[in-house]
Image (cartoon, helix red, strand yellow):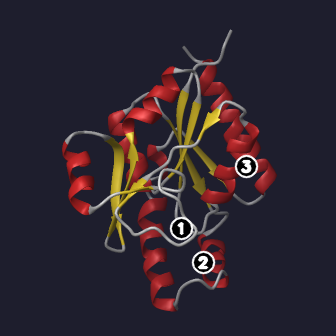
Amino acid sequence: MTPRGLLVVIAGPSGVGKGTVHGRVRAALPDSVLSVSVTTRPARPNEADGVDYHFVDRPRFEQMVADGELLEWAEYAGNLYGTPRRPAEAAVADGKVVVLDIEVQGALQVREQSTDALLVFLAPPSFAELERRLRTRGTEDDEAVDARLEVARRELAQRDLFDAVVVNDDLDRCVAEVLDAIAAARTVT
């Protein structure tokens, strides 16, 4: 039996390791497809349109929302970000696995749009550990970290809305659990 295509969402609070887990999961799935997000933020010098993001202006993005072209979208730091619907749905229909690394609010939008998606919530081993990770990465000042922690409290309260909750305290075990959840979801008819 050929495994069915699947839309997988990996979400969780900032600092939980979504990007790392996403990369390892995609590397372990030979039939995974990268979903290139659309954004209104300007491209950075090392970024290419259509590779890193699809860069559009705000009116075009808003038209995409109005036309139902996005599975999910959100605004962060004054810029809009979203997941184009058509390429993700085409890849799933072709039997591929599309793995999204998005925020919790986006994951819940995907659930509203696609009840067949697998939503995986990455949780920290503790709130104290999440705070330690955010503060030691040194990318933001204390005020910004405090704001991220406040958002994290709300996101952690939504973990029961996901199909699977995986604690990211050991990367290898965490990735294995996510892969197991994907395998199980792909064999369900």
**Residue 14 tag number:** 1
Q: Please, what is the three-letter code of the amino acid marked with disc 2? A: Leu
Q: For marks 2 and 3, give the one nearer the viewer.
A: 3
Placement of the N terminus among the 4 image quadrants: top right
Q: Is residue 125 left or right of residue 9?
A: right
The label on residue 24 is 3
Residue 12 is left or right of residue 106, and the answer is right
User: Mark 1 belongs to which amino acid?
Assistant: Ser
Q: Residues within 10 Å of mark 2 (few under 14, many from 20)?
A: many
Q: Quadrant of residue 80?
A: bottom left
**Dot 3: few (<14), some (14–19), or many (≥20) neighbours within 10 Å?**
some
Identify the disc placed on residue 134: 2
Q: Pointer 2 and pointer 1: residues touching (CB < 8 Å)?
A: yes
Rendering coords of residue 43 (x, y %): 46, 67
Q: Is residue 137 left or right of residue 114?
A: right
Which residue is found at the position 59% from the left and 71% from the top?
A: 127
Give the mark toward the camera: 3 or 1: 3
* Disc with the residue nearer the chain's start (3 vs 1): 1
| Relative side of 77 to 164, left or right | left
Extreme residue toward the top, this view: 1
Q: Nearer the viewer, residue 130 or 7?
A: 7
SS at mark 3 in the image:
helix
